[in-house]
Amino acid sequence: MLQHLSLTARLTLFFTIMAGVVVFGVGLLFMHEADQHFIDLDRMTLLDKQHLIEEILKDTASPKDLRWRLREALSHHHGLFSQVKDPSSAIIFESKDFISVPKTSEDNTLLTWKNEGIEFRAIRSQFLSVTMPASAFEITVALDTQHHQHFLNDLQRSFAIYAVLATLISGLLGWWAAHQGMAPLRAMKLRAAGVSGQQLDARMPIAAVPVEMADLARALNKMFDRLQEDFRRLSEFSSDLAHELRTPISNLLTQTEVTLNSEREGAVYRDILASNTEELQRLSRMVSDMLFLAKTEQGSDLLHKEQFSAAKEVQALLDFYEVVAEEQDIHLSSQGEGSLFCDRLMFRRALSNLLSNALRHTPTNGDVVVD
């Protein structure tokens, strides 16, 4: 799926995902720290009330005064519940609507539990009174954390909205940054699109692109150099070919037009046709030679090298020229055996040119030997 997305879209997607992960990660960390802060705050509040009760127990000698002082000190705190028991587990003081606190084996351990969907925290401890001998009191202090939960829930909702908006805004900023970052690439694309056969000298400005794209610009410039050189060679080849073919074709056309202007004897027509044949053969060799030179300029990859018998190829060419040789009373023959590793067509073309020249310059009753 990502293969079909543009580079800008990919960068935007990756940036949005990373921004979302970071924002939500920071949010989870913040929520955890906020919850831990409230836990510490509740523990400090519970310990503070516990110490207050202990101070009252220290300074009070009678149970009656103890109940009165505890009621005055602890009855005005909303969400705070406290209970004091004497050594016989009789309740000396208990806040209104006091809830049952789970048992614990350790003193001053922060307990957290839920009752009817509401989370509570409590601390239970034992205190030995000095003013009332042999009186070990059990102190339990509990706290309703519902207000903390309301705050955390509101904070969580607000942060969720903020995280979504922050991620979307980060995605838009990421798209803008990626779009701006791709500006040099778009400029290179427009510059490359302007290259044509009439404007092959255009090059990519290496100094105007970022470092990461400099290698790409150099590679494109080298490619344009090769294209310009190949186009120049092609133009020169076309020009040379037209120049070489223009004169012989013009001669053939003129000679043919002159011949057709008046009636002539059969021998004259044969001589003219023989002359045209020689000229056409020369044109054919010229075209073949120019094509061969054009191929060799492009490298040896165009040559199909193979192992073959030289004697068989020589004999095939001798058979081809046998008719021409018989008309001129020339004897063709070959000697020797061997194999070659080269382009078969190029070998036949070279040998054919040699045999053609030999037949043209060998006198009657002569011999042409391929050794």
Image (spheres, rainbow, N blue to C red):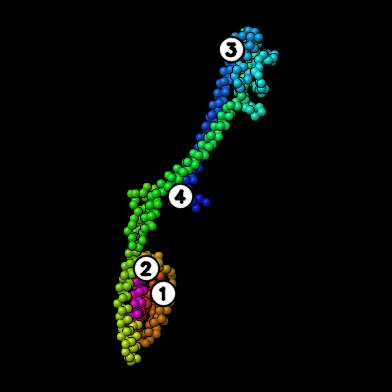
State the SS at label 2. Answer: helix
Q: Is residue 227 above or below residue 346?
A: above
10 Å neighbourhood of mark 1: few (<14), some, or many (≥20)? some
The question of residue 283 being in magenta is answered with: yes
Q: CA distance from mark 3 to mark 1?
A: 122 Å
State the SS at label 4. Answer: helix
The disc, 1 or 4, on the residue closer to the chain's N-terminal end is 4
Q: Which residue is mark 1?
A: 310
Which stretch is magenta? 278-294
The answer to whether marks 3 and 4 mark residues whose Cβ atoms lie closer than 8 Å is no
The disc, 3 or 1, on the residue closer to the chain's N-terminal end is 3
The answer to whether marks 3 and 1 mark residues whose Cβ atoms lie closer than 8 Å is no
Q: Which residue is mark 4?
A: 7
Is residue 119 visible in the rendered structure shown here? yes
Percent of width and height locating residue 168: 49, 42
Q: In the rendered view of the protein, which quadrant contains the C terminus?
A: bottom left
- Amino acid at the residue labelled 2: Lys
Q: Which residue is mark 2?
A: 295
The disc, 2 or 1, on the residue closer to the chain's N-terminal end is 2
